Amino acid sequence: MIKRITQLFILLALFLTPAASLHAAGTKTGETVYVPEGEIVSGTLYAAGGTITVDGTISGDLIAVAQSIIINGRIEGDVIGAGQDITINGEVGGNIRAIGNDLTVNGVVARNITAFGANIILGPESRTGWDVYAAGNNLTIRGIIDGGLSGRTNQALVTGKIGKNIDLNLNGGNSEKLSIASGAIVNGDINYTAENNADISADASIAGNVQKTAPPIKTKNLAWSWIWGRLFAIFAAIAVGLVMTTICKNPLNKIINFIDEKKGRILGPGLIIFFVVPPAALVLVLTVVGIPLALIMGTLWLTAVYIAKILTAIWLGNLLIKKILKKENLPLAWSLVPGVIICWLLFSVPFAGWIFGLTAAWLGLGGLWFYVANKSGNL
C-alpha cells in the first residue's frame, strides 16, 4: 500500500516538474506538433497540442500533453506524458511515466514503465528493461519485461515473458480476471489479490510459486478507493482541459484574462448564475411543456460548472507560473496540468473542499459571463 501511494504521488509530482524547468527546455505547441524523421532535438522537449508525433530523435526527455501522442522515433531520456491516446512504437532510453485512456507500447524501453489508464497494452514487439507498474481497467502484456510486473487492474492478460515476479491487485469484483496464457513465461512468483482464481494455462512456464490473497474487507479499502477516485477525477479534468485548450485557445485566453483582471467583480455574476439556474429549471419541471427545456438547462448548467472549475484551474496554474517562474504567454496546456492537480486536491480537502469547489465554480462562471457580455458589446 505505501509503495503504491508513493508511486502515485511521485507521478503527480513529475507532472509538476515541467513548469519548474521551462527555461532550460525547448517548447513546441500547436494543433499539430511534429518532429520529422532525421531531425534531432537537443535536450528536453516540452510539447503541447492536439496531436504530437515524434518520428525523429530527442536527445533528452519528452514531456508532452496532448490528445494524441505518437512516438515512432527515439527518445534518449524519459517520456512523461498525459493524453487521451499514447502510442510508443520507437525506443525510449529512460523511463515511461504516462497517464492516458489508452496506452500502447510496441517498442523498447530501457528502464521502467509507470502507466495509469483504462487500457494498457505492451505489444508482442515490446521490451522493458526494468519493471512495469500499471494501474487501470485492462492490462495486456504480450511482450518481454526483464524485471517484474506490479499494479492494480480489473483484468490482466499475460502472454509474454516476465523476468521476475508478478504482483497484481485485481479489484473488479465479479468481472475481475487474471489470465496467464499458453506460452507465457514467468521467471518468478505470481502473487495476486482477487476474489476469483487466476486462469493459468498448463502450457505456461511458472518458475516460482502461485499465491492468491483474498481482497481486504471493503471498509478497510476506502482510503485507497478515495485516492483512485481523485486520480481519475484529475485525469478526466486534464483530458477535458486539453480539448478546451486545443479548440478554444483564443476564447480561453480572454476568459483567463477576465478572471485575472476582475477577480472581485466576477464573483457576483458567477454566484448568481450558480444559484439562479437550478431553481428556474425546477420551476419549468412543474409544467409539462417545460420539462425538455428544464433538462437542457440542467445539463448545460452542470457542464458550465464543470468547465468553470477547469477555467479557474488554468487561471491558477497560469498565475503560479507567472509568479514563480516569471514566464509570460506560455501555452495554456502548461497552466492546465499543475492548476488542475492543485485545484482538484483542494476540492478533496475534508470539510472545506466544497468551499474551494464553489469558489472555483463562481470564478469560472463569472469569467464566462464577462466573456459573453464582452462579445455581445455590453462591456
Image (spheres, helix red, strand yellow):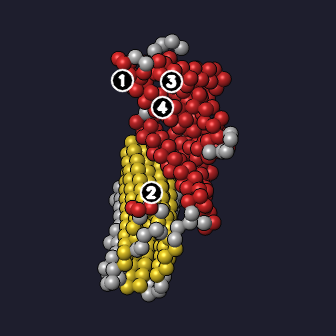
Marks 2 and 3, how far apart in space? 34 Å
Name the residue tied to disc 1.
292
Badge 1 marks a residue whose secondary structure is helix
Q: Is residue 344 left or right of residue 82?
A: right
Residue picked out by circle 4: 302
Pinpoint residue 137: horizontal percent, then vertical percent: 42, 59
Q: Residue at x 55, y 59 (%)?
A: 218
**Mark 2 or 3, which is nearer the eye?**
3
Q: Amino acid at mark 3?
A: Pro
Q: Which residue is mark 3?
A: 278
Depth order, front residue of 121/1: 1
- Return the disc, 2 or 1, that comes first in the chain's sequence: 2
- Looking at the picture, tell me which residue is in the foreground, 120 or 2: 2
Does residue 372 sit above or below 183 in this rendering?
above
**Residue designated by label 2:** 117
Which amino acid, by three-letter code, is at mark 1? Pro
Residue toward you, 177 or 160: 177
Mark 2, mark 1: which one is toward the viewer?
1
Q: Looking at the picture, does residue 15 appear above or below residue 347?
A: below
Please tell me how crowded label 2 is: few (under 14), some (14-19), or many (20+) other residues with Cα within 10 Å: many
Q: Position of residue 88 (x, y in %)?
A: 38, 62
The amino acid pointed to by label 4 is Leu
